[in-house]
Every structure is written in structure tokens, then in C-alpha cells.
Amino acid sequence: MSSGRARLPDETGFAAGPDGVRIAYEVFGAGDPTLVLLPSTPIVHSRQWKGQVAYLSRHYRVVTFDGRGNGLSDRPTDPDAYREEFMVGDIERVMDATGTDAAVLIGLCGDGVWRAIELAAAKPDRVLGIVAFAVGVPLLTPPHPWRVQWSFEDELPTDEGWAKVNRHYYRRDYPGFARFFFGEMTPESHSTKQVDDAADWTVDGSVEAMIADAEVEQSWTLESIEETCRAVRCPMLLVHGSEDRCQPPSRARRLSELTGAPLVVVEGAGHMIPGRHPVLANLLIRDFVRSLSSEVT
Amino acid sequence: MARVRAPERPPAERRSRSGAGAPQGAHEQARARYPDTTGYVERHGVRVFYEVYGSGEPTLLLLPTWSIIHSRFWKLQIPDLARRYRVVTFDGRGNGRSDRPTTAAAYAETEFAADALAVMDATGTDRAVLIALSMGAQRGLLLATDHAERVAGAVFIGPALDLAWFAPGREPVDDFLDHRDTDEGWAKYNAHYWRRDYRGFLEFFFSKVLTEAHSTKPTDDAVGWGLETDPETLILTQLAPGIGKRDDILARIARVKCPVLVIHGREDAIRAYAQGEELARASGGRLITIEGGGHMPNARDPVKVNLAIRDFIANLGRGSR
């Protein structure tokens, strides 16, 4: 199905990575500051922010992009292309391509939140603030047990439940994985539309990109991650659902302790707060961005 | 790094570029409520697909409208109504899981009415409250007059009855089969254009059906249902016998004995508000006006419509007519 949009971009284009991978971006509105909505890639693409773009672009300039591996961006299948330096670098490259010196970064889960933190720690001049939904900072506290119950690599004796997060199952039934996963991510009642959307965006992407991304070996330790978090100097707002089945709420609490950032726990909410609770998410973003300008001295 | 202007509207299959994934929309959207039973009735070789939800009283028969869409257009009524009542719906011949017969006669209003009776028989429904949208009014009127004993009440939403001009700004369609020198606006209501650019017609038509702001989702839905049938089938529906001219229709309305509710959008750009007004007046029914509403208030104002249906049914029990 095609999809009518509440708001079409004013400008679209591509930023090129140093490895030649093309990153598709879109720009909406002309307000100030610029908000960059980060992609949860390669599982979905920038339409994940459909509940935000139309509203936020009335007040601010909004930049979105499809992360490498989905949407209109290129889909390399070499795990090297999904190394953290490229993923974080793509944010900067899109900012460069859109003439954005500094921006508020808005992200969901590890793909958005952790990379926003990495960029803010490394390039503080470019990040005015961070709104972190479903605080996916790796290793900060132990993962949910079901996330580590099954091997991603091995052939499993079952396809039930979280055993679907498995490279062999991905290749057998990628849409089946997507519907299961986003069902888990959106446990709220009346979420059929959000689950359908997210599963469609997954299927829009590439199973080989997902597998390549999963093969990247990270060199993080708990110490290095905590050090990066402590290095962030910009204001942050953390928003986490009490029923998040991807990222444990304890990670949000721990990041709040490490950084002093305020934490909003949304009771009864799952992982997909911007999609499932758009008005709440949008008002939290707006209030946070307003508070930034009042802090300028 | 190239910068390009945004397209006027995004290409239809914007995200399907790799060919690596399964086709988009290959599966039906998840439903808030699934049917308890489904089945087919067959008449003269044409199979019609029906669904039954819930077990309350009375039974509501949600009639098909023009076969440009199928029974999912009731998606915002079914889950709510099925909590209280028994809900029966079916795909009108020509779309959904029903057959697409290849003669115009097979799309006569009398055929749709006969399908409705066959579905009532197959589902053990002696009497039902009819709920009709747009073209559904024509088959609904046939049922409420020629089979009055089976109709406990009738709700007509945006009724398409030739009691008044289509709608302000809507042009005549007498040259439906002729070649035209333009594709602008209502000139798209033309067999040749449908064959040339079926999707273009669907997008135009539903932009006139769903005139309210913030209608991208129901418009996407409706265009998607439209694409489940084809222009040749829709052309046949245009050539099929209806229920007559204004005088025939008024004579038929005068025979309606069951309680009637009419719900009509004041800004309906497909079927003028005046059509609903006259149906209400002629039938002695109640008229509920959706201010600012277009041709599918069931999609754009579902809570109002559902509550109006609930009130109507509550009053049926009081036998006050």
C-alpha cells in the first residue's frame, strides 16, 4: 500500500558516506531549532516518526533520514558498513548535507539514543539536546531475559516467541518476525495500526541488511559506555515505558543517575512511545525544546 | 550530495525499491475484531462472501455499497456494534472475496438485494436492522419495501438516491462511455479514463468522498480496497439497472413501514445533503446532520455514527412509531 502523508517534505536529498553509501534525508518546515529524528535502522525507516513530523514541523525545522539498510538509503550487505563509526557518522553527514550546524537529536532505543549520546560526547558543538525514547544504552543494566534466551546464530529447535529473533528464521519468514517483534514492542490495546505500520516498514527493508547489522562486533565495555554517558554536557530528557519489552526501564533509571537527566516513565506504555502515544511524545519534545532556549544565558 | 525538490506527492510504492522484501500490503491489515463465522452464499453461479460477528440482539445487516470498495469500509463500526448486537456483513459482488460476474445485469440493484436475503437465510437471520452507506440505500430500500417483514429498521448514511442533483460542483455523467477530451475533475468519471488510469480515478473519487482534513488514512484504505477490484467490473456496475427515477424512488419510500434514520454530511460532495434530507422527510425518519462532514461519516466520524446507530436501536424496542 502506498501511504498518504499528513505532511510532505519541503526538501529531499541524499548524503553520501565515506564508503559511498547513500543516505536519503527529508527536511520539513523552517522553524528553529532543527530537530533531527534518528532512524531505528535497519529494522524500520524514517516513517517511524510519522506521528511526530507533521506536528513538530509546524514549530521547528525537522530533518529525518532513512538509516543505511532501509527506506530509500542504500542497503549494503557487508557487516563492515554497519560499524558504529558509520552509523554515528551518518547523523553528522545528514546534518552537513542539510546545512545544520547543531540540532536537537531525537531517538528511540539503541539505534537512536545510544548514537545520539555517542555524537554528543564526541562533538558537543553539534548537539543542542537529546530526547531519548526507550533508553537503549547497551550494557548499562542486564537485558530482559527473553532477549538473551536464544542464539541469534544457531538453528533453533523452535520458532516460537523470541526464538524468531534468529538469522535462520529471518530468512524463512521475515514478515513473521516483524509482526511478532512489533507485537511485543506495542503491548498496549488497540495497537493494530502501529504494529501493521512497523511490520510493513521492516518488510520494506532488507533481511540481509538486518543480518549484516547484527554481525557487527562491538568493542564496548560497561566502563566505556558509562564514561561516554558521563561525558554528555547537553540537556537530555529520558522517556521510557513501564512495559517496554525491548529495553528494561532500569537502563533509563541508570542513565538518569549517571547524567542527572530527568526521566519520564510512562505507565503501561511499551517500547514504541512516539508511535503509540504521539500526543504525549510531541508535547514532551516541545516542552523540552522550549526549555533549551530559556536556558541560554 | 544532490538536493532535489520534493515530489508533489510521494510515488505510490515509495519504499519498495530493493525487491528483497515481500510485497507491501500482501497481507490484510490487522483487525480490531475478527469474525466469529464466515461463509459464502451462491446464487446463479455467483459466490458472495459474508461474515458474522457477536451474538447480541438484534442482528444488524451492514449492507455493501458501490463495489468500488468492500465490507472493510465498516471497519470502524463492526468492533463497536458487535459488542452489543449480532453483526452480519458481506462483500458486494464485484469486490472483496465475492465473485466478479462479467455482465452488467449481474450488478442490478435487485441482485444485491437478493444477495442480502441469501446471506440472511444462510446466517439464520429472520429480521435485521439494515445499515447502508451511499449506494447501499438503493438495495436497502428494495429490502425495506419488497421484504418489509425481514427489516426491523433502516439506517441510511449518505444515501445515494436520485432525489436531487448529485452534489454541488459534480458534473453529469451521460457521456460515461464516450471519449472525452479532458481528464480534469469529474471528467475522470469515464470508462476510458478508468481503463487508462484506474488508480488516478480512485484517488480523485475518494478525495471527493473524504473531504475532511486529516483523512489520509481512510483515503489510503479506500483506494486500497478499490484496487482489489478492476475498472471493467466497475464499468459494469455503471451499466446495471438501478431503482428508477425520482418518482419511482419517492413511491417506494412511501411504502417503507419500518423506522428510518438518515445520517448525512452537510458538505457531502458525492451525494448532496438534499438527498438525505428528502429521504428523511419522505419516510418520516429522523435526520442527523454531520456538520462539515463528507460522504463517509462512518469513517470520519465513527463515534457519532456508532452512537447514533445505538440510539436508533434502543428506540426500536419502544415501538414508538
Image (cartoon, grey):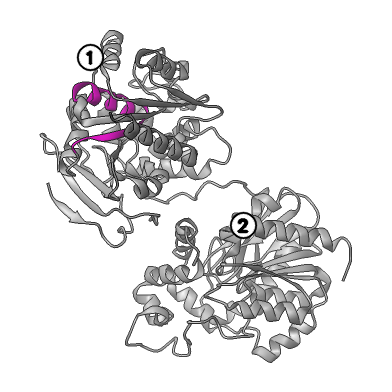
* Residue B289 picture quarter: bottom right
Q: Residue at x 41, y 67 (%)?
A: B203
Q: Which residues are magenta?
A: A101-123
Q: Tell me if residue B268 comes above or below residue A58 in the rendering.
A: below
Q: Which residue is mark 2?
A: B302
Q: Tell me if residue A183 comes above or below residue B225 in the rendering.
A: above
Q: Amino acid at mark 1?
A: Ser
Q: Is residue A108 found inside the magenta-colored segment of the image?
A: yes
State which chain disc 2 sits on. Answer: B
Q: Which residue is mark 1?
A: A219
Q: Tell me if residue B38 comes above or below residue B133 in the rendering.
A: above
Q: Secondary structure at mark 2?
A: helix
Percent coordinates x, y for residue A57 in the rendering: 34, 48
Q: Secondary structure at mark 1?
A: loop
Question: Who is closer to the viewer here, A223 or B26?
Answer: A223
- The CA distance from mark 2 to mark 1 is 53 Å
* Residue B249 picture quarter: bottom right
Question: Who is closer to the viewer here, B1 or B162?
Answer: B1
Q: Does the magenta stretch mainly form a helix, a strand or a loop?
A: helix
